[in-house]
Amino acid sequence: MTQTFWRVEKAKYAGVAKTGEGARLAGGRWTSPGQRTIYCAEHLSLAILEVLVHAPDPTQRAGRIRFHIRCDRRLVERLANSPLPPDFSPRTPYAVTRTLGDEWLQRGRAPVLSVPSAIVPTENNYLLNPDHPAFGHLSWDPYEAITLDDRLWTVGQPRQLSSRPPHSATIE
């Protein structure tokens, strides 16, 4: 069986998207700075939500690309729910989840770890370990440009009224 996941990245980083360098520099929810990791999502829509949550400033609308990644399910380790607090959410401290991700990287049992999304808890995100010996068994499709709807960048901002008249239906 095949597992698939998605990565949305700034186009200018296409050449280093498979290195985990961004997470090494900044860390993330599941790994501390200094740990090379690639964050992915189970669905393209969740990958886009992750971009919007972590880069909500409209000045960060830089061109984006998407990667579709596949691997054999046997290469994916699943995080047991027990180590997570029962109220796991975006408010869960990073110290809790980083400990789990850092330990997974150190154990090195699998090139991929499935973790729950803090944004959509019924969906999964995936951590990829580019230093794992089996990382080369992941299949990356060539990247494609992706255009995010401009309205996504205005979530939470006051809406501007359109100068167009409202649409009205005519019944004959």
Image: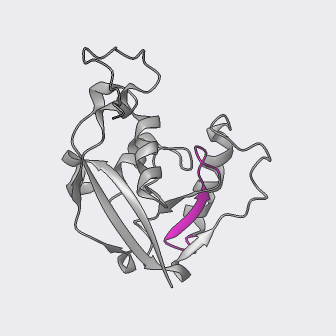
- What's the residue at 47%, 43% (across, down)? 27
Where is residue 140? Give x, y as percent: 31, 71
What range of the chain is rendered magenta? 108-121
- What's the residue at 39%, 17% (across, down)? 159
Quadrant of residue 71 in the image? bottom left
Q: Is 56 in the magenta? A: no
Quadrant of residue 134 in the image? bottom left
Q: Is 109 in the magenta? A: yes
Where is residue 9? Give x, y as percent: 31, 49
Tell me: residue 172, above or below residue 97.
Answer: above
The residue lying toward the viewer, choosing from 54 and 120, is 120
In the image: residue 18, left or right of residue 99: left
Tell me: residue 24, above or below residue 40.
Answer: above
Q: Decide if residue 139 is in sight here.
A: yes
Residue extending furthest front?
172
Where is residue 75? Give x, y as percent: 52, 78
Main SS of residues in magenta = loop
Where is residue 132? Give x, y as percent: 45, 72
Rendered image coloring scheme: one colour
Residue extending furthest bottom?
1
Tell me: residue 40, above or below residue 49.
Answer: below
The residue lying toward the viewer, choosing from 88 and 154, is 154
Which quadrant would the C terminus be assigned to in this image?
Answer: top left
Tell me: residue 169, above or below residue 27.
Answer: above
Q: Decide if residue 18 is in sight here.
A: no
The residue lying toward the viewer, choosing from 70 and 107, is 70
- What's the residue at 66%, 34% (across, down)? 91
The residue lying toward the viewer, choosing from 135 and 46, is 46
Q: How many marks?
A: 0
